Image (tube, helix red, strand yellow):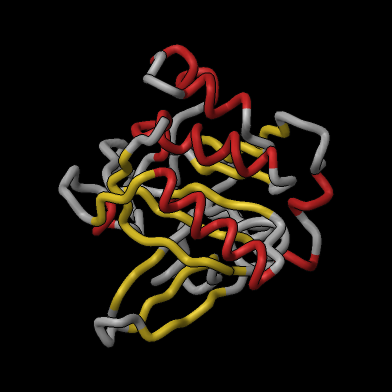
Amino acid sequence: MTTYLNVAARIPCTSVEGPGLRYALWVQGCDIDCPGCCNQELLPFVRRQVISSSEIILEIEQAREFHDIEGVTFLGGEPAYQAKGLAEIAALCQLQGLSVMMFTGFQLGQLRQRNLPGVEHLLSHTDIVVDGPFVVARRDTRRNWVGSENQRFHYLTQRYDALIETSTNGRHAVEVRIGLNDRLEINGFPLIDELQSTSQLNGF
């Protein structure tokens, strides 16, 4: 079954969006509206790139072949709003031995209570969930990949454990690229106040 997703951006290989080398996918749309969010362009529920889950799976297979990625990471926007399509991708990724990581602005309990389409299926094929809104007053510079102290790691399988949260292999870092539109694109987890966020893909 093929589902279409509204995708804001994707990177075939990144080292700053979770453990190891990963394919990262940002979905469009979020109404949590965390003050200080650096992904402002990803919040509106507008059409960006409508891509089928099968096409994204093909890209992930190519990333695995060319870059030897360890897994995939779903970010946003809010991935839970497009859980049905992401669940299809996650299920096939795990069959290929790839890990799945997801960032959500909801707390895990809230996410399950909302009963959004596809969420339980997505969670059943996810190794790590990082949950909770970004709280600008509670900046976290100790743990990897999170923006604020309230955000929690949930290990839904035994593939990873809490050691990854403070491993020096995942220290706060950014990647800078020149996009096809000649914009400077930054993703990752910088320490400087102007750019720090739970995750970001911004153009300047």
Q: Position of residue 22 (x, y in %)?
A: 62, 60
- In this rendering, is residue 6 above or below 24? above
- Expressed as whole percent of the image width and height from the top left, the position of residue 69 reads 68, 62
Q: Is residue 94 above or below residue 191?
A: above
Q: Is residue 151 left or right of residue 32?
A: right
Residue under the point 55% across and 42% down: 102
* Quadrant occupied by the N terminus: top left
The C terminus - image quarter: bottom left
- Residue at the spot x=41%, y=35% of the render? 85
| Residue at 54 percent of width and 36 percent of height | 131
Q: Quadrant of residue 185?
A: bottom left
- In this rendering, position of residue 172 left or right of residue 102: right
Residue 201: x %, y % from top left: 39, 66
Q: Position of residue 18 (x, y in %)?
A: 64, 56
Asked if residue 99 can be seen in this view, the reply is yes
Res 200 quadrant in image: bottom left
Q: Residue at x 53, y 22 (%)?
A: 121
Residue 143 seen in this snapshot: no
Depth check, front residue: 93 or 46: 93
Q: As rendered, which of 145 and 34 lies closer to the eye? A: 145
Of the pair 134 and 39, the residue shown nearer to us? 39
In the image, 52 versus 195, the foreground residue is: 52
- Looking at the rendered structure, the number of numbered marks drawn on it comes to 0
